[in-house]
Image (cartoon, rainbow, N blue to C red):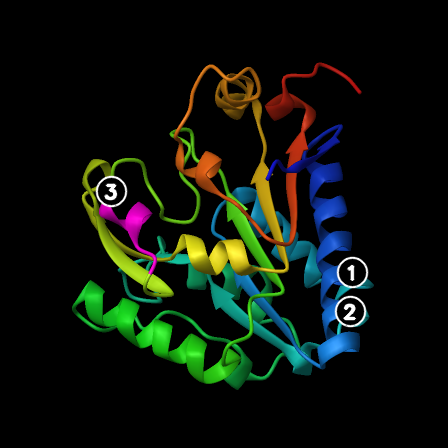
């Protein structure tokens, strides 16, 4: 399934549009099912989204007591580490919002073994969400085409029997834990954020069919699927 492309004039417009989309998704899920399950992403554009969600009037538009925050991937570092997606999201949004602590579900990276982190997080997802899919999965796009921590040429790409998996990313010399394709593809809505001129080359290669088999190209969401891009990433000088 191809993504619906939404191109904004600049990064600020992209964050505003993403914030409004997040709010719409949350309100719809809460109205229909009484709860909103979302998997957060790391990265600068998601950080801007979180910061905006934490400000008025946006923060007042969601019943945060009915929101459950998960993480699509995480580096196996302590929650206090500067590389932690949980720390970034906490400082940008979570610490400010009126969301119950029990509704925030960081990966248990204090465990010493990455496989245990993955196993425990899958159990948490099942305990909280039962068989329900995520209402929204947020993803960034790496310059190598990775999404979440689904990196090219890693065993994680082939995992289909678990909600999560651990992997070692050679080029970053680090262990990570990520949700898997079945979890992402089952989501009711998936948004990939792509911002900045540095992403223009890979976006162009994908659009022109000059490259194939990248992790992002292996996505097959069953629900709504969007690429939110700024003009620079989309290779447009103006809109």
Residue name at image x 35 percent, y 53 percent: 83
Q: Quadrant of the N terminus?
A: top right
Q: Residue at x 70, y 60 (%)?
A: 53
Instruction: Name the spot of residue 19 as percent of width and height, x first.
Output: 72, 53
Picture layout, residue 10 above or below residue 103: above
Picture coordinates of residue 169, whole percent (x, y): 23, 44
Q: Residue at x 43, y 79 (%)?
A: 126
The reply to whether discs 1 and 2 touch (Cβ–Cβ < 8 Å) is: yes
Residue tagged 1: 24
Going from N to C along the chain, the mark reached first, 2 or 3, is: 2
Of labels 3 and 1, the one closer to you: 3
Q: Residues within 10 Å of mark 2 (few under 14, many from 20)?
A: some
The stretch in magenta equals 155-160
The answer to which quarter of the image holds residue 62 is bottom right
Magenta span has 82?
A: no
SS for callout 3: loop
Determine whether 52 is above or below 80 in the image: above
Q: Main secondary structure of the magenta part?
A: helix
Look at discs 2 and 3 and give the one toward the viewer. 3
What element does badge 2 sit on? helix
1, 3: nearer the viewer: 1
Query: Taking 39 as reference, is 11 left or right?
Result: right
Quadrant for the C terminus in the image: top right
Relative to the observer, which residue lies in front, 169 or 93? Answer: 169
Quadrant hosting residue 15: top right
User: Which disc number belongs to residue 39?
Assistant: none
Q: Is residue 1 above or below residue 51?
A: above
Tag of residue 27? 2
Q: Secondary structure at mark 1?
A: helix
Other residues around mark 1 within 10 Å, as few (<14) / some (14–19) / many (≥20) = few
Would residue 162 be found to the left or right of residue 41 on screen? left
Q: CA distance from mark 2 to mark 3?
A: 37 Å
């Amino acid at each position: 399934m191809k993504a619906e492309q939404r191109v904004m004039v600049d990064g600020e417009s992209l964050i505003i549009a993403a914030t409004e989309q997040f709010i719409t998704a949350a309100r719809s899920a809460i109205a229909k099912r009484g709860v909103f399950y979302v998997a957060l992403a790391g990265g600068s554009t998601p950080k801007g989204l979180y910061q905006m969600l934490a400000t008025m009037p946006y923060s007042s538009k969601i019943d945060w007591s009915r929101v459950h925050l998960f993480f699509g991937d995480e580096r196996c570092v302590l929650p206090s580490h500067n590389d932690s997606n949980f720390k970034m999201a906490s400082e940008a949004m979570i610490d400010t919002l009126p969301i119950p602590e029990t509704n925030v579900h960081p990966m248990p990276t204090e465990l010493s073994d990455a496989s245990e982190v993955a196993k425990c997080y899958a159990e948490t997802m099942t305990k909280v969400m039962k068989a329900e899919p995520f209402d929204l999965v947020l993803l960034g796009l790496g310059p190598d085409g990775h999404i979440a921590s689904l990196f090219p040429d890693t065993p994680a790409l082939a995992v289909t029997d678990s909600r999560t998996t651990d992997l070692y990313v050679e080029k970053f010399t680090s262990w990570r834990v990520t949700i898997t394709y079945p979890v992402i593809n089952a989501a009711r809505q998936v948004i990939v954020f792509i911002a900045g001129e540095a992403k223009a080359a890979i976006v162009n290669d994908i659009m022109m069919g000059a490259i194939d088999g990248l992790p992002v190209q292996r996505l097959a969401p069953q629900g709504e699927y969007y690429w939110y891009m700024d003009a620079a990433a989309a290779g447009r000088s103006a809109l």
